[in-house]
Image (spheres, helix red, strand yellow):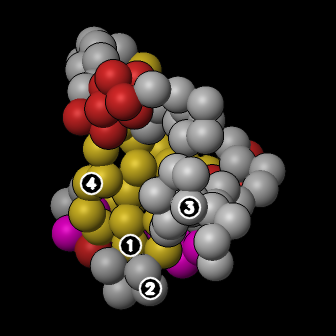
Amino acid sequence: MKILNCPLNGPRNILEFSYGGEFHPMPDPSRCGSKEWAEYIYFAENQAGLVTEWWYHLASSYWFLAQRNTITDEIVRTFEVNEVFSERVEFSTQPEGDQNNG
């Protein structure tokens, strides 16, 4: 049985988790173009070696990050997202140009 250490719930069977994809820094949504945003959403580096990944604990609905060696499948460490994110990013729901027409 493979164990994954959830930062919130402690060591758990890996079957309690869902893989969320490779982590890479988000571009500023108000300053990037469509191509840069699409690359952020749809493309991953898929590199061999140490990568940072999103993981989700199904029972507690808790997202966190893990560093995993993709060659050995060893999970080096898990950590809370506040180590990477200092504030919440808000996305506008109005089309650009309509933001003053509330």
Q: Residue placed farthest to the right in the image?
A: 86
- In the image, what residue type sits under mark 1? His
Question: What is the magenta range?
Answer: 8-15
Instruction: State left or right for residue 62 relative to residue 34.
Output: right
Question: Percent from the top left, x then y, of residue 87?
Answer: 77, 56
| Dot label at residue 98 | 3
- Secondary element under disc 1, as helix, strand or loop, is strand
Observer able to see residue 2: yes
- Secondary element under disc 3, as helix, strand or loop, is loop
- Secondary element under disc 4, as helix, strand or loop, is strand
The residue at which mark 2 appears reads as: 60
Instruction: State left or right for residue 18 relative to residue 57.
Output: left
Q: Is residue 9 magenta?
A: yes
The answer to whether 44 is drawn above or below residue 41 in the figure is above
Question: Percent from the top left, x then y, of residue 96?
Answer: 52, 51
Residues tagged 1 and 2 counted as in contact (Cβ below 8 A)? yes
The Cα atoms of the two marked residues, 3 and 1, are separated by 38 Å
| Dot label at residue 19 | 4
In this rendered view, identify the residue nearer to me: 80 or 90.
90
Does label 3 or label 2 sit earlier along the sequence? 2
The residue at which mark 1 appears reads as: 57
Observer able to see residue 73: no
The Cα atoms of the two marked residues, 1 and 4, are separated by 9 Å
Q: Is residue 48 magenta?
A: no
- In the image, what residue type sits under mark 2? Ser
